[in-house]
Amino acid sequence: MAEEYKSHSKGERSPHRIIILKIIIFVLFAVYTTRLFSMQILSGDIYLSRAQNIARQTRIIPAQRGEIFDRNYDIPLVVNTDSFVVSITPAEVSRSDLQELFDRLAGILNINRQQIESRIPPSIYHLYQPVEIASNVSFSMISAIAEQAHSLPGVSWQSRPLRNYPDISSLSHIIGYVGNIDREELIVLYNRGYQQGDIIGKSGIERQYDELLRGIEGRETGTVDVRGRRMSGDLTRIPPEMGKNLVLTIDRNIQTLVEKALGSRVGSVVVLRPGTGEILAMVSYPWYDPNIFNMTDFSTEFQRLINDTNRPFLNRAIQASYPPASAFKIVMTAGILAENSFNRLQTVECTGEIQFGNRTWRCHIRTPGHGRLNLMRGLAQSCNIYYWTVGRDYLGVDNIVKYSTDFGFGRISGIDLPGEISGLVPTPQWKLQRFGDQWMAGDTMNISIGQGDMMVTPLQMANMVAMAVNDGVIYKPHLLKEIRDPITGILLTSIEPEVMHRSNISPAVFAELKRDMRGVVTEGTVRYPMNFQTVEIAGKTGTGEVGLPNNFHSWFASYAPYQTNNPDERVVVSVIVEAVNNWEWWAPYCSAIIYQGIFANQTYEEAIASLGFRDTNVLRDRRD
């Protein structure tokens, strides 16, 4: 009976299970039918568009970067030349032939086989998309590949513009160079349209104005199959747009003149138009050749430059700071006159040395000293004892700091180059925070002659002189003069002078200051190197002692013409020759060559012949 009951119970439940199963099947069928109806009928157009997009592949067409010119807008300083990239489509090569292909291409392209393997690992052997294995490939290499194309399956090449810097020498710090965008740059720039694989400016103008120079990439879109192979059919192409052309304030002829005048001396020169802030020349030695970054394997040369103790990648005009030494006495003179803290006719006696604290402070003329000097003779003879005394006992540290910052020290100028530093104007508060020590009278004496912890850049020194020339106005220094259309050459934007700072010092003070700066040349420390009639010069020397005794930086900060009916022709020249060079007091002589070349319209060779300079290693023991 039990077995019969069980069999009967199972028989009663079976129809219920079948009914439930039928209901489930019906519901699933209804759901799928509804979904298919929605996808194919109601939303068919949307999914068709998506399918078409998935089946279409877009290739980037690189845009040419804009060219860069000097102020004459004739011969470009930077150009684009044709270069090639070589790619392999892995799936078009049988796996048994890939290794042999890698070996053959490495030999043709003169690269390591590992470089190819690192870009085409086994995990992507199935791809039908080209993978770039080498860039900046020469036409001769492409010709070799083309000749062997039948035995190089899957290999293709494409033209890509290459940045070329034809013999720019000392302009390298201004122009800069380009390279592949790195991860950190991409994080910052992604929201501004930059993508992985973009070429961007890494330094100089190339970096500062990258968005103007880079242009707009083109697009070429076509249909591919499921494995990524290009199929015949429609092809749409949006051509690239070249970047804007930039015209700089630099004058190529003056740049070359300055480059040769400085020679192979570690240092820097800035030539500035004080009435506009235009940089006519900026030289920092040593420089580097930005074309090294076009080499297939530039790492060896790049590492050599990085390890060079003279730091060729450093733009000393804006990225290195030095004690201003006696050239700082221009600021001191302006402060003394503006504050009327010490009558300009009142004298201080210089006997060659003074005792203060527990040390002897010696002037650069030790025996018998300068004798009695007023302000004008104190500046002309660059007497340390005069400025030590007046700075410590009359002007005071607070006023020295005030006029230092007024002349632009201790802050960046905002020049349109990356990496500018601010230098340092030391204060009692700074010393207390930095060293935990109180400011002493000896500290005031040190900064009174531009020594101690006072640090300035050559560009700041040029701005100091420009402020004196402009009766209290400093124009923002700049290198960009114009932006032009790359095709038509039409002027799109012209950069107007911009006032960076306006001083409250009276014009009468600047008139006296300029007269005293002229006295430095006519009867002071530089009357011999500046003894020529081409143009009247006013300025101030500086000899900054650094490190070991008898290690000196050589400064000369100046302008010309001293008097003129056309202020637009004036130029400021700031020269620093570092103490690492053999001592030769070269800054004033370098400046003389520059002024002779500019105002006599002469080359370097013609200028030194006119000045009678035969031996550049002259007057090695001259000071201030």
Image (cartoon, helix red, strand yellow):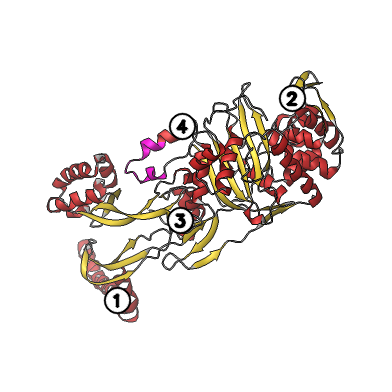
Mark 4, residue position: 308
Q: Which of the two marks, 1 or 2, is nearer to us in this view? A: 2
In whole angstroms, how far apart are the C-alphas of marks 1 and 2?
98 Å
| Residue under pointer 3 | 68
**N-term mark: 4 or 3:** 3
**The magenta segment:** 290-302
Task: Assign a secondary structure to mark 3.
Answer: strand
Residue 125 in view in this figure: no
Location of residue 573 in the rendering, given as x and y in whole percent from the top left corner: 61, 44
- Looking at the rendered structure, the secondary structure element under dot 1 is helix
Mark 1: amino acid = Leu
Residue identified by numbered label 1: 36
Closer to viewer: mark 4 or mark 1 = 4
Residue drawn 43% across and 55% down? Answer: 76
Point out the tag, 1 or 2, that comes first from the N-terminus: 1
N-terminal of the pair, mark 4 or mark 1, is 1
Residue contact at pointers 4 and 1, CB within 8 angstroms: no
Q: Are marks 4 and 2 in contact (CB under 8 Å)?
A: no
Can you say whether 326 is above or below 408 in the image?
A: above
Q: Nearer the viewer, mark 2 or mark 3?
A: 2
Label 4 to label 1: alpha-carbon separation: 70 Å
x then y, percent, for residue 288 = 44, 40
Q: Is residue 197 left or right of residue 156?
A: right
Q: Secondary structure at mark 2?
A: loop
